[in-house]
Amino acid sequence: MRLQHDWTEFQSSQGPVPAWLSCPAAVSDPLPGVVVIQEVWGVDGHIQDVADRFASAGYVALAPDLHSAGEARPPALAPERVEAVKAFLDTLRPGEWMAILGDEGRRAEILARLPGDQGAALGETLGTLFSGARDASAQVGVLQAAVGFLKGHEACAGRPVGAVGYCMGGSLSALLACAEPELAAAVVYYGSSPPAERVEAIRCPILGLYGEQDERITSGVPAFAEAMKAAGKRFEYQIYPETPHAFFNDTRASYRVEAARDAWACTLAFFAEQLVLRE
């Protein structure tokens, strides 16, 4: 399918936000929208490709660059430096890279083995990406503005808008469902569940897709499912056996084609039901 896709910009409470916008070129009628929420790496080639996949499936897709919301991207998060971090993490044993992110001593020990100033540069970027200093409420505010931008865009013209997020973006997709009453559906790919006290505010159905080996994330899913059930909310989820974190990212060593294929089919079916058939 021929697509119209390029960078655009919308306004938020944080200031202007660059975003990758993609939609079918041959369709003139308004289409439902999907906010595609980045992994921690940013709106890189993979996230742009995912947005294009949703456009090819008949949606208007918008991927906001949360690292550049309202300000210039920090030098430590320059695309080439983020790519260097991803390449370094792919050299570690499966699962080890998740462990070192939370252990600064172990991280420093591994980085010290690298030649020259490579370890220092990687450490600065890792620290910036995973410092825990991100303001989730501000990011959710940006994503709420993204929902409003899509609903008002001529390619959507008020049709329903859903959200899908990956890793950090999966957590934000769930939090967006807690905060944005106009959101029609949310998909969480291996993202943390929202606090139990936020469940009552959720107004849209949620689909969760997880890897069994991603215990840090999956351990919280049963409690979230129970809280959603108790509140009368719809939450469907799938945990793929023997599958790691980030199984959908086909640019990483964690990619698992069987789980990714099924998760994509589940996502499209969910959005078709919630964004197309329920208008």
Image: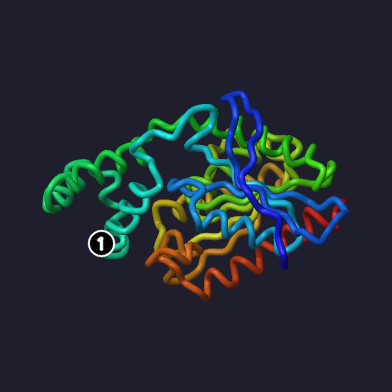
Q: Is residue 167 visible?
A: yes
| Viewer-closest of 247 and 205 | 247
Q: Residue drawn 47% across and 46% down?
A: 42
Q: Position of residue 164 (x, y in %)?
A: 62, 51
Q: Amino acid at mark 1?
A: Leu
Q: Can you tell which quarter of the image residue 157 is in?
A: top right
Q: Residue drawn 84% across and 41% down?
A: 158
Q: Position of residue 245 (x, y in %)?
A: 43, 59
Instruction: State left or right for residue 100 relative to residue 190.
Output: left
Q: Which type of secondary structure does the marked residue at label 1 adopt?
A: loop
| Viewer-closest of 50 and 200 | 50
Q: Number of labelled discs?
A: 1
Q: Is residue 205 visible?
A: no
Q: Position of residue 29 (x, y in %)?
A: 88, 54
Residue located beneath label 1 in the image: 92
Q: Can you tell which quarter of the image residue 108 is in?
A: top left
| Viewer-closest of 252 and 74 | 74
Quadrant of the image for the N terminus? bottom right
Q: Position of residue 201 (x, y in %)?
A: 68, 34
